[in-house]
């Protein structure tokens, strides 16, 4: 039986890898394995808007329209958990039955962009006064028990995320090992535990019918491949590795350039304040002293790049599904307005 994706068999391996990177699909393996990955993922139902219902019992904050894509992207952590909110109109991914399609690229609106410390019993955040506190005084040993962190997972979601009625929540997928090491670090287990609690809480709200949105796990390696695919190339096109520190630096540079020169996103409100902090932080690195309170912002950069990468993956999946082989050239030019 002929398939709409049979044209994939005529592609070169490099073309298949490019399609996979552009759509957030696993790009490793031989040509037959890669074709199977692409066929499986591209054949799945496209992203749509859920039937929207507010979380019961919570004061509703400034609400987006119910027909908008309201996306929250979370970069996991305990001391430094970062998240952002992106809004897109329904015309971003019109249904196949809808004749109205955007004639120009749609720019996501960035409404929230913040970082919090969930190790604190009452974790709050402010976009313009993010601080990292240090003290020389001895403190009691911090508890990381499930009974301690379950309420904090619930508080984080019901305070910062769910009151805004998100349609999609993207959560950075955690590893069990760091940098390929054989040991499993205690801190990694703590973040994994908190990640699982977020999923469990959201699943509970979904099962109760109080939140109908979708949770999407995102592998950080795929995000890095999307934004840094040219970072490890030599002049002859040969691939080479890029260190974790260099990867962080390059991603921060991309975000700094993004907010300073106004491409890929339109920042408003609290997110615009955070963007100004990022710009001033960059100016401090050039000799005027680092902006007090912000420090390194790799976690903030990661949550934003994760959200924007997912937006482009969904656009590109629709593009590949509709245009087939003709989409290859367009994919090469279709990276967030750059």
Image (tube, rainbow, N blue to C red):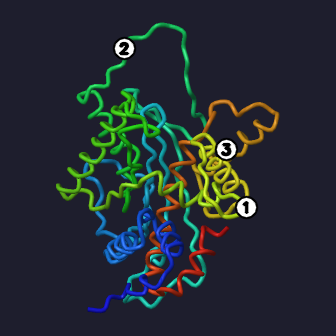
SS state under label 2? loop
Residue in view at x 53 percent, y 83 percent: 327
At horizontal 82% and vertical 34% (from top left) the residue drawn is 287
Residue matched to label 2: 141
Please tell me which of labels 2 and 1 falls first in the chain.
2
**Label 1 neighbourhood size at 10 Å, few (<14), some (14-19), many (20+)?**
few
Question: Mark 2 or mark 3: which is in front?
Answer: 2
Left or right of 193 in this view: 129: right
Residue indicated by mark 1: 235
Looking at the image, residue 210 sits to the left or right of residue 173; the answer is left
Measured Cα–Cα span from mark 2 to mark 1: 52 Å
Residue at figure coordinates x 67%, y 67% from the top left: 338
Percent x, y of residue 166? 38, 58
Q: Quadrant of residue 330?
A: bottom right
Give the label on residue 305, or none. Answer: none
Q: Quadrant of the N terminus?
A: bottom left
Sequence-first tag of 1 and 3 = 1
Please tell me which residue lies in front, 29 or 248: 29
Instruction: Tell whether label 3 touches label 1 (CB within 8 Å).
Output: no
Comes first in the chain, label 2 or label 3: 2
Q: Nearer the viewer, residue 104 or 309?
A: 309
Badge 2 crowding class, 10 Å Cα cut-off, few under 14, some 14 to 19, many 20 or more, is few
Question: Dot 3 corresponds to which residue?
Answer: 278
Direction top: furthest residue: 138
Pair 2/1: label in front:
1
The residue lying toward the viewer, choosing from 112 and 42, is 42
Q: Secondary structure at mark 1?
A: loop
What residue is rendered at 47% in x and 39% in y? Answer: 179
Which quadrant would residue 31 be assigned to in this image?
A: bottom left
Percent of width and height locating residue 232: 63, 54
> Residue 336: percent from the left, percent from the top?
60, 67
Which is in the foreground here, disc 1 or disc 3? 1
């Amino acid at each position: 039986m002929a398939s709409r994706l049979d044209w994939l068999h005529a592609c070169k391996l490099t073309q298949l890898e490019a399609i996979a990177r552009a759509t957030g699909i696993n790009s490793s393996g031989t040509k037959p394995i890669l074709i199977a990955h692409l066929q499986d993922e591209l054949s799945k139902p496209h992203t749509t808007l859920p039937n929207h219902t507010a979380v019961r019992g919570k004061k509703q904050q400034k609400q987006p329209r119910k027909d908008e894509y309201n996306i929250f992207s979370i970069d996991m952590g305990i001391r430094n958990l970062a998240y952002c909110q992106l809004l897109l109109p329904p015309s971003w991914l019109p249904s196949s039955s809808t004749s109205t399609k955007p004639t120009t690229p749609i720019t996501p609106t960035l409404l929230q962009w913040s970082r919090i410390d969930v190790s604190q019993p009452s974790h709050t955040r402010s976009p313009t006064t993010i601080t990292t506190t240090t003290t020389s005084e001895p403190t009691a040993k911090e508890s990381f028990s499930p009974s301690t962190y379950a309420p904090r997972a619930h508080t984080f979601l019901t305070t910062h995320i769910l009151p805004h009625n998100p349609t999609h929540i993207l959560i950075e997928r955690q590893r069990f090992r760091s940098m390929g090491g054989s040991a499993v670090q205690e801190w990694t287990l703590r973040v994994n535990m908190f990640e699982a609690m977020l999923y469990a809480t959201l699943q509970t709200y979904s099962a109760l019918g109080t939140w109908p949105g979708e949770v999407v796990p995102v592998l950080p390696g795929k995000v890095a491949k999307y934004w840094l695919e040219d970072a490890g190339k030599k002049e002859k096109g040969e691939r080479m590795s890029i260190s974790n520190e260099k990867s962080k630096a390059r991603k921060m540079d991309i975000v700094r350039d993004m907010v300073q020169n106004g491409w890929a996103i339109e920042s408003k409100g609290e997110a615009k304040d955070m963007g100004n902090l990022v710009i001033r932080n960059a100016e401090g690195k050039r000799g005027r002293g680092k902006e007090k309170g912000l420090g390194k912002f790799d976690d903030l950069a990661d949550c934003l790049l994760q959200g924007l990468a997912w937006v482009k993956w969904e656009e590109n999946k629709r593009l590949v599904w509709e245009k087939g082989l003709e989409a290859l050239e367009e994919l090469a030019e279709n990276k967030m307005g750059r």
